[in-house]
Amino acid sequence: MDDTTATPYDVWFTEDPAAFLAVAQDRLALDPVLTTVVSSVTHRIERQRTAGAARPAHPQWWAVVRDGDGEVVGAAMRTAPFVPHPLFVLPMPDGAARALAGALHGRGEEVPGVNGALPAARVLADEVARLSGGSASVWEHTRLHELGELVAPAPVPGRARLASPADAELCLAWFRAFGDAAAEQAAREHSGHADEHHTLEDMHERIAEQRIVLWEVDGTVVHLTGFNLPSFGVCRIGPVFTPTEHRGHGYASATVAEVSRRLREAGDRVCLFTDQANPTSNKIYAAIGFRPVADLANLRVD
């Protein structure tokens, strides 16, 4: 959306997740599916900080954009632990996105990547590129889906079970392999940077929080589905990974449906992202009952 008048915007930055939530949580809670990434990541970092975790070497900050009346009209964060540490942008007026780009330029911050809701992410990336004399291009089109009526897929052999500490190394290998597999299915080159940050410690934390479900057939693990803890009553599923040798048997459909059922029974709404260029995953999730909510994009700024 564009501004019909010249509206003044104020941009506020903080490196404190609790301070950001204190200012932005009402805005985030208005549409907790659309804000799922910012909400869940911020809540997770807040929990880690409370537990005494040190601040990372990579950028980790949040921004709030207010209009001339002081109302919060947009939010963004830069917390991604992988190169190029892209921003994640929530919906906001075009003028607010340009104001955020101007504030970033004013503080001398390089922004090589922008991820988030359209058109805000595109407007921000274009303005960053204009101010720096570069150009912005879309690397990946994604789509956010929310589960409507859950449709049980056809039964498949095996069972779903929670990952145990003994599964941590397998989970780590599959988390790291996910990006390459997704890019291959979408016929797109993948750098691998987004997967390198996963660690064995991270897997043990996820396993302790019961956030990884495996599908097992005759003692062999054939599939992994992860999900985040709820934020404002919404859980986001991902990653969803089946090794090449086990694909085509319905394990992803069965596991995602089972995880979705469990989350629903716990009282949470369920959402997930797909790569719009990946026909396989889009077909699977639509058949289970996931419906499109919003289009997003990953953009590079050169």
Image: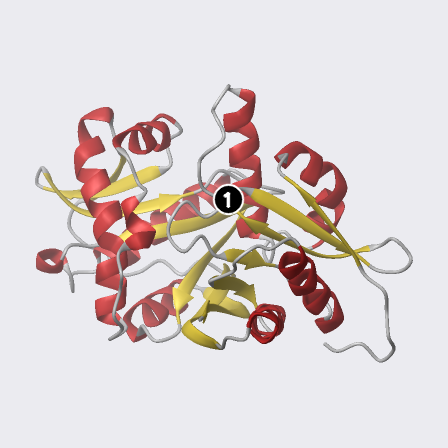
- Closer to the camera in the image, 129 or 150: 129
Residue under numbered circle 1: 59
Q: In this view, does 234 lie to the left or right of 29?
A: left
Placement of 198 over or under 96, stated as above or below: above
Give 239 or 219, whichever is nearer the viewer: 239
Instruction: Using the rendered view, name the quadrant where residue 204 is placed.
Output: top left
Residue name at image x 22 percent, y 32 percent = 168
Nearest the camera: 249 or 58? 58
- Taking 175 as reference, is 124 above or below it? below
159 displayed left or right of 136: left
* Quarter of the rendering occupied by the N terminus: bottom right
Quarter of the image for residue 105 reads bottom right
Above or below 128: residue 106: above
Q: Dividing the picture into quarters, in which one does residue 61 lie?
A: top right
Q: Position of residue 76 (x, y in %)?
A: 62, 54
**Picture quarter with the C terminus:** bottom left
x, y percentage for residue 235?
Answer: 50, 46
Q: Which residue is drawn at 52% across and 58% down?
A: 110
For image coordinates 50% across by 45% down, the residue present is 79
Residue 24 pos. (x, y %): 72, 45
Is the residue marked by circle 1 packed among few (<14), some (14-19), or many (20+) residues within 10 Å? some
